[in-house]
Image: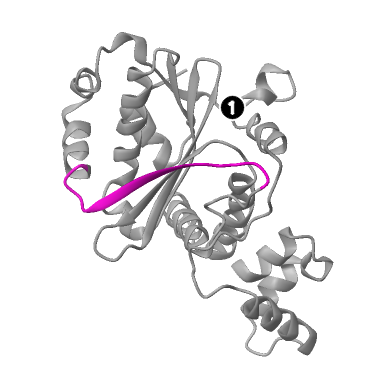
């Protein structure tokens, strides 16, 4: 699917039909033309699954694309969004004070997160270059994340996999076309990419804009680690007042956000 999607986002008109992609990938005997397209797409993939293949969007386009996630649609009157989970960091002198404000359960989870065996690196998403997280390894994180979320929130498994895959494609395309800072998590033993967090700043707000994790990362409490690290950087930065963890709805992920912030 990643091979097909990469060709589609690169502007190859033969790959515009994602329904054909689904039919080809999950049909044991796809039509000859579709099979040829898939073979061509697969042959174009690099041997390194961490090599970025995204489009080199100019920085101005990336910044414009980030505005929606920062709430531009709401404050320009285009549409209403769900309430966001916000944290005013001006009330904290350091990250330890923030941690003490959390429930006992949240503090225990954070302690588990910091006991895990992963590394974190930071990269700025540049203009006129492929996004550093536009690789197959990062795409896998998005897909596993969406499948896991849908499975936890859906009362039926009918078509859940295809729904999650379609949602993952849409979200992957959005995040790799936007600006910000990338925090990449890797397993310390294998070097495998297990999660990434993408942050953006606007005014005195820092937004945890995107977060996707593999099943392995979910078991290592990586999201909690990323939140505390984000809060710590915000507290230490005199130019930041608010940490925005994004929309808070009714899914399991939203419940976690409410445990480490407030909903406004």
Q: Position of residue 110 (x, y in %)?
A: 21, 37
Q: Which residue is mark 1?
A: 70
**Is residue 247 found inside the magenta-colored segment of the image?**
no
Pick the residue in front: 210 or 183. Answer: 183
Q: Is residue 9 left or right of residue 116?
A: right
- The residue located at (42%, 56%) in the rendering is 148
Q: Secondary structure at mark 1?
A: loop
Residue 39 versus residue 111 in the image, above or below: below
- The residue located at (68%, 76%) in the rendering is 41
Let me know if residue 191 appears in the view: yes
Q: Is residue 23 left or right of residue 256?
A: right
Q: Position of residue 217 (x, y in %)?
A: 32, 54
- The residue located at (70%, 80%) in the rendering is 40
Q: Position of residue 263 (x, y in %)?
A: 43, 21
**Is residue 117 found inside the magenta-colored segment of the image?**
yes
Q: Position of residue 71 (x, y in %)?
A: 61, 25
What stretch of residues is rendered in magenta?
114-128
Q: Is residue 253 left or right of residue 67?
A: left
Residue 253 versus residue 92 in the image, above or below: below
Residue 130 versus residue 48 in the image, above or below: above
Residue 193 versus residue 99 in the image, above or below: below
Give the residue at the far top of this rendering: 91
């Amino acid at each position: 699917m990643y091979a097909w999607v990469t060709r589609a986002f690169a502007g190859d008109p033969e790959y515009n039909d994602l329904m054909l992609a689904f039919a080809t990938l999950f049909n044991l005997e796809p039509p000859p033309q579709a099979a040829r397209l898939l073979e061509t797409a697969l042959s174009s993939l690099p041997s390194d699954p961490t090599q970025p293949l995204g489009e080199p969007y100019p920085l101005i386009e990336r910044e414009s694309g980030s505005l929606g996630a920062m709430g531009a649609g709401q404050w320009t009157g285009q549409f209403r969004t769900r309430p966001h989970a916000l944290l005013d960091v001006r009330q904290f002198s350091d990250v330890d004070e923030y941690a003490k404000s959390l429930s006992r359960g949240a503090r225990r989870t954070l302690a588990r997160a910091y006991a895990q065996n992963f590394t974190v690196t930071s990269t700025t998403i540049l203009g006129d270059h492929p996004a550093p997280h536009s690789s197959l390894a990062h795409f896998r994180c998005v897909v596993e994340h969406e499948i896991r979320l849908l499975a936890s929130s859906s009362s039926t498994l009918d078509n859940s996999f295809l729904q999650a895959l379609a949602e993952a494609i849409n979200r992957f395309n959005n995040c790799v076309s936007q600006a910000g800072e990338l925090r990449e998590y890797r397993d310390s033993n294998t070097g495998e990419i297990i999660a990434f967090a993408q942050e953006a700043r606007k005014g005195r707000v820092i937004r945890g804009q995107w977060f996707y994790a593999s099943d392995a990362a979910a078991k290592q409490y990586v999201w909690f680690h990323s939140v505390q690290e984000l809060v710590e950087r915000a507290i230490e930065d005199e130019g930041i007042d608010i940490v925005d963890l994004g929309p808070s709805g009714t899914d399991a992920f939203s419940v976690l956000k409410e445990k480490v912030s407030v909903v406004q």
